[in-house]
Amino acid sequence: MEYNYIKSLHLIFVITWFAGLFYIPRIFIYHIEARQKPQPDADILSNQFKIMANRLWYIITWPSAILATLFAVWLLALVPSWLEQGWMHIKLSFVILLFAYHIKTHFIFKQFQNNEIRWTSNGMRLWNEGATLILFAVVFLVILKNSISWIWGIVGLIGLGVLLMLGIKLYKRLREKNSSR
């Protein structure tokens, strides 16, 4: 019984963690694009996006990451045999990658808070897809466990990455076409 409650809480906080990781780059994109507007609009929007990002990052994303991790450790304490399984080793590797992504996003967040914007909106759209790829990998690993073919899994992730990049390029072309009208 305890296991199901802990698993549910872990899943809830993983979902809210990813929600934050998906949305913060969108705020960064809006922030980048707002700086191209005339004054005072650029400053007003920039300040609003900083407030939105700050609240999202410190009230939702960081606490969710910490709570998801605490409940994950609790689950591993309840079912230590998972640590002997190959799928869990790979999942934990993706979790480490997710934390690296989170920490890099934190550095980007700090730069935006200090008006040090070094990204293009297209570059930030590409960055945003990193969390998507990690999410796909982890969900498939957890659901399929040992029945997944690692070769097909890797091919699938590469294919998803290519599709996401093509989608971003298509979106950029459509935006450029619509803005030239």
Image (cartoon, rainbow, N blue to C red):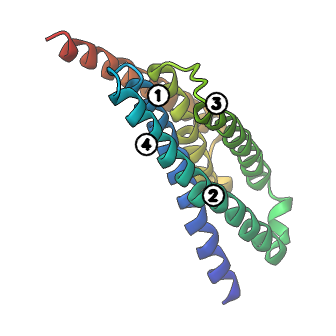
Nearer the camera: disc 1 or disc 2: 1
Instruction: Tell me how far mark 2 sits from mark 4, CA to CA.
Output: 38 Å
Nearer the camera: disc 2 or disc 4: 4
Tell me the kind of residue under disc 4.
Gln
Q: Position of residue 93 (x, y in %)?
A: 77, 44
Residue 48: mark in rendering = 4
Residue 129 against residue 85 in the figure, above or below: above
Which of the image's four quarters has the N terminus? bottom right
Q: Residue furthest bottom?
A: 1
Q: Nearer the viewer, residue 52 or 24?
A: 52
Asked if residue 167 lies left or right of residue 103, the reply is left
**SS at mark 1 in the image:** helix
Residue 46: mark in rendering = none
Going from the N terminus, do you reach mark 3 or mark 1 first?
3
Instruction: Tell me how far mark 2 sits from mark 3, CA to CA.
Output: 34 Å
**SS at mark 2 in the image:** helix
Going from the N terminus, do you reach mark 2 or mark 3 first?
3
Question: In the rendered image, which residue does mark 3 sit on?
Answer: 111
Question: In the rendered image, which residue does mark 1 sit on?
Answer: 125
Residue 142: mark in rendering = 2
Q: Are marks 2 and 4 in contact (CB under 8 Å)?
A: no
Q: Are marks 1 and 2 in contact (CB under 8 Å)?
A: no
Q: Position of residue 69 (x, y in %)?
A: 73, 62
Instruction: Tell me how far mark 3 sits from mark 4, CA to CA.
Output: 16 Å
Q: Nearer the viewer, residue 21 or 93?
A: 21
**SS at mark 3 in the image:** helix
Tell me the kind of residue under disc 1.
Arg
Which of the image's four quarters has the C terminus? top left
Q: Residue at x 51, y 34 (%)?
A: 129
Q: Nearer the viewer, residue 10 or 159?
A: 10
Going from the N terminus, do you reach mark 2 or mark 4 first?
4
Tell me the kind of residue under disc 3.
Gln
